[in-house]
Image: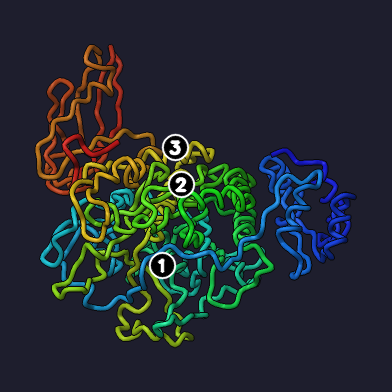
């Protein structure tokens, strides 16, 4: 959108007035502003010479907010503004109370009953965080004596990715959500601080104050108290501190209190009265792009209850233009002011929504807005979560939990274990009424489900990927990195057959082709960034891989001389050197893992080495299950 003459004139008037004008400097507009008694005519984002070139490209500097007598006829005023030359769009501001977190049901505080004895696992020897083996969404070992439904490999393939990278302190993820408890002992080391104001870890756009408010609570009609756990839970999935001998792990949480990505808390929801004079979404995006965030994590949506799918689409087109422009501006400008950033631009990632049982495959916004990455949710057996929105507009899937997949023996009750385990509030200044303090060993941790929980898995993997890119000195445009991320998935559609408890469609085939390219795979993203080709083999089977296609094809005269695994034990293979039969190598892996394979070959009289990653995974389909 090119900047209009009217917008330029309005900016001049606003600048002369010190940024809070009551008139525009445009005659036709000012006549109307005078008539309606406007007491504010102000740009929605602040004037900033450093950012005006970006705003010119997206049109962000063309949006103004008008405040006037609340008794005026809003519809009539809107029509009159729309008729004025120089004004191209008129929108009615969306009440912030229509913003909602996209989790399903209540948080379940962690208790000892959720952590049955598992013995030593691959997860337990990877990091020393006591609850990591129960974060199935990071490493799913499949059925056990307690639960029959999990399937091995239904996770984000994180443990193998950690062999390459665990995070980078220079990568900042803005969590637009309820507030993140910045003092949480399993998050504090990975909380962003404003370099110019070290005590500032984000901003409360709900109340329009620098103080994040995680202490307000609300009580529903049944007397149940709800606390602001959502943002803290989301943040923990991305960057809970790893290998600190407590609690859970985060995808890009570093190791031993160092090297984790930083969480910037942009509070756009809350349980206080709030400040309706502010536009929390746009201001949160502005704060994020100006303060160095390169990923905007959004596990929220709008309450469209009562509207049809067609009406929702129409509402999005008519009344959310300023939100779309803010999203576009983050994608265009985030990271662009930092020459050392591995991402020149930004990623905006949204939860798809939890109304799949109501709206079917209809587009749900903001997630369905094309420039963003929309994330659907799966359970711990590769199947769609019972609540997830779906459709051709969904870009990818991640584990989001599903309470129906872990039924208890007692009818009508369900275990929480099939949901996502992460951090929740543990501020002792709050008088909790949900029993979370009863078992102090697990205080500060809990289970939730929803596309809200799937979304930070993608944000976390993206942050881990950018951390690795920084480690290797690689740089990407937003479009380039988005393409890498969207292609770093494994296929899950072949699991969408038959029926499933909690889902109203008659056959899961209705979801085929409508959960994006597949489930996000952390290792696959890091290997793509590294530039290393990966070959995938199933656990427990002899698998022969023909490497001819990597060396010029069947008619090529390149000859393979030797093949050595760097870490054969990772795959449960005893010998490092592998036997070569022409261009074929046979592997038999006894456990999931990854190892670098170095093949020496000759072309003419020149010897060279090429590197591959051999990845052993459970749950591979007959075709490998990988894109």
Vertical position of residue 206 compared to residue 593: above or below: below
- Estimate the spatial distance between the alpha carbons at disc 2 and disc 1, rounded to whole Å: 20 Å
Which residue is identified by label 2? 373
Q: Nearer the viewer, residue 181 or 124?
A: 181
Q: Residue 217 appears at what percent x and percent y?
A: 49, 80
Drawn side of residue 347 relative to residue 131, left or right = right
Q: Quadrant of residue 510?
A: top left
Residue depicted at 27% across the width and 70% down the height:
130
Q: Nearer the viewer, residue 326 or 256?
A: 326
Residue depicted at 22% across the width and 42% down the height:
494
Crowding near the residue tagged with mark 3, few <14, some 14–19, many ≥20 C-alpha atoms within 10 Å: few
Q: Quadrant of residue 32?
A: bottom right
State how many labels appear: 3
Mark carried by residue 233? 1
Which label sits in the foreground, 2 or 3?
2
Crowding near the residue tagged with mark 2, few <14, some 14–19, many ≥20 C-alpha atoms within 10 Å: many
Drawn side of residue 156 relative to residue 284, left or right = left
Look at the numbered disc 3 and give the secondary structure of its residue.
helix
Look at the numbered disc 1 and give the secondary structure of its residue.
helix
Q: Quadrant of the C terminus?
A: top left
Residue 622 seen in the figure: yes
Which label sits in the foreground, 2 or 1?
2
Mark carried by residue 450? none
Q: Quadrant of residue 225?
A: bottom left
Which residue is identified by label 3? 483
Drawn side of residue 323 relative to residue 365, left or right = right
Comes first in the chain, label 3 or label 1: 1
Q: Residue 186 appears at what percent x and percent y?
A: 41, 70
Q: Residue 482 appears at what percent x and percent y?
A: 46, 41
- Estimate the spatial distance between the alpha carbons at disc 3 and disc 1, rounded to whole Å: 27 Å
């Amino acid at each position: 959108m090119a900047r209009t003459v009217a917008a330029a004139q309005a900016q001049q008037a606003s600048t002369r007035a010190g940024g809070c004008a009551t008139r525009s400097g445009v005659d036709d507009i000012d006549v109307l502003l005078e008539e309606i008694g406007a007491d504010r005519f102000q740009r929605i984002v602040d004037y900033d010479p450093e950012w005006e070139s970006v705003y010119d490209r997206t049109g962000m500097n063309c949006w103004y907010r008008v405040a006037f007598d609340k008794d005026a006829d809003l519809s009539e005023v809107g029509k009159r503004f729309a008729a004025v030359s120089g004004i191209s769009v008129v929108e009615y501001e969306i009440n912030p109370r229509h913003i909602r977190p996209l989790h399903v049901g209540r948080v379940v505080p962690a208790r000892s009953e959720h952590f049955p004895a598992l013995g030593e696992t691959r997860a337990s020897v990877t990091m020393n965080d006591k609850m990591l083996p129960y974060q199935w969404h990071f490493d799913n070992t499949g059925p056990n004596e307690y639960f029959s439904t999990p399937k091995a490999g239904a996770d984000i393939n994180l443990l193998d990715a950690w062999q390459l990278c665990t995070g980078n302190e220079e990568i900042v993820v803005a969590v637009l959500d309820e507030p993140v408890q910045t003092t949480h002992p399993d998050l504090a080391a990975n909380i962003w601080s404003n370099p110019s104001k070290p005590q500032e870890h984000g901003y409360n756009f709900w109340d329009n104050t620098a103080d994040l408010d995680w202490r307000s609570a609300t009580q529903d009609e049944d007397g149940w108290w709800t606390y602001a756990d959502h943002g803290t839970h989301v943040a923990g999935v991305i960057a809970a501190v790893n290998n600190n001998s407590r609690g859970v792990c985060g995808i890009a949480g570093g190791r031993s209190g160092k090297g984790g990505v930083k969480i910037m808390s942009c509070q756009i929801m809350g349980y206080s009265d709030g400040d309706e004079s502010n536009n929390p979404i746009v201001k949160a995006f502005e704060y994020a792009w100006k303060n160095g965030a390169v990923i905007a994590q959004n596990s929220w949506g709008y309450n469209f209850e009562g509207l049809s799918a067609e009406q929702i689409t129409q509402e999005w087109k008519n009344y959310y233009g300023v939100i779309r422009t803010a999203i576009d501006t983050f994608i265009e400008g985030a990271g662009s002011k930092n020459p050392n950033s591995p991402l020149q631009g930004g990623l905006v990632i949204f939860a798809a929504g939890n109304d799949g049982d109501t709206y079917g495959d209809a587009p749900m916004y903001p997630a369905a807005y094309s420039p963003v990455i929309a994330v659907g949710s799966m359970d711990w057996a590769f199947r769609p979560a019972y609540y997830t929105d779906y459709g051709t507009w969904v870009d990818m899937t991640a584990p989001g939990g599903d309470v129906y997949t872990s039924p208890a023996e007692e009818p009508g009750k369900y275990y929480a274990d099939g949901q996502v385990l992460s951090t929740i509030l543990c501020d002792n200044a709050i008088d909790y009424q949900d029993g979370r303090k009863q078992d102090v060993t697990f205080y500060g941790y809990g289970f939730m489900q929803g596309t809200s929980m799937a979304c930070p898995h993608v944000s976390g993997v993206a942050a881990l990927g950018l951390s690795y890119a920084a480690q290797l000195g690689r740089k990407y445009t937003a479009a380039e990195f988005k393409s890498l991320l969207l292609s770093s998935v494994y296929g899950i559609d072949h699991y969408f057959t038959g029926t499933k408890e909690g889902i109203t469609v008659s056959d899961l085939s209705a979801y085929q082709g409508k959960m994006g390219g597949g489930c996000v795979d952390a290792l696959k993203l890091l290997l793509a960034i590294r530039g290393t080709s990966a070959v995938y083999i199933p656990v427990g089977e002899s698998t022969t891989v023909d490497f001819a296609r990597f060396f010029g094809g069947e008619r090529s005269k390149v000859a393979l001389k030797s093949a050595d695994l760097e870490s054969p034990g990772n795959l449960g293979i005893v010998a490092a050197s592998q036997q070569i039969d022409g261009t074929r190598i046979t592997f038999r892996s006894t456990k999931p893992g990854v190892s670098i394979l170095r093949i020496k070959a000759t072309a003419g009289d020149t010897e060279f080495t090429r590197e591959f990653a051999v990845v052993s995974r459970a749950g591979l389909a007959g075709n490998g299950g990988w894109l």
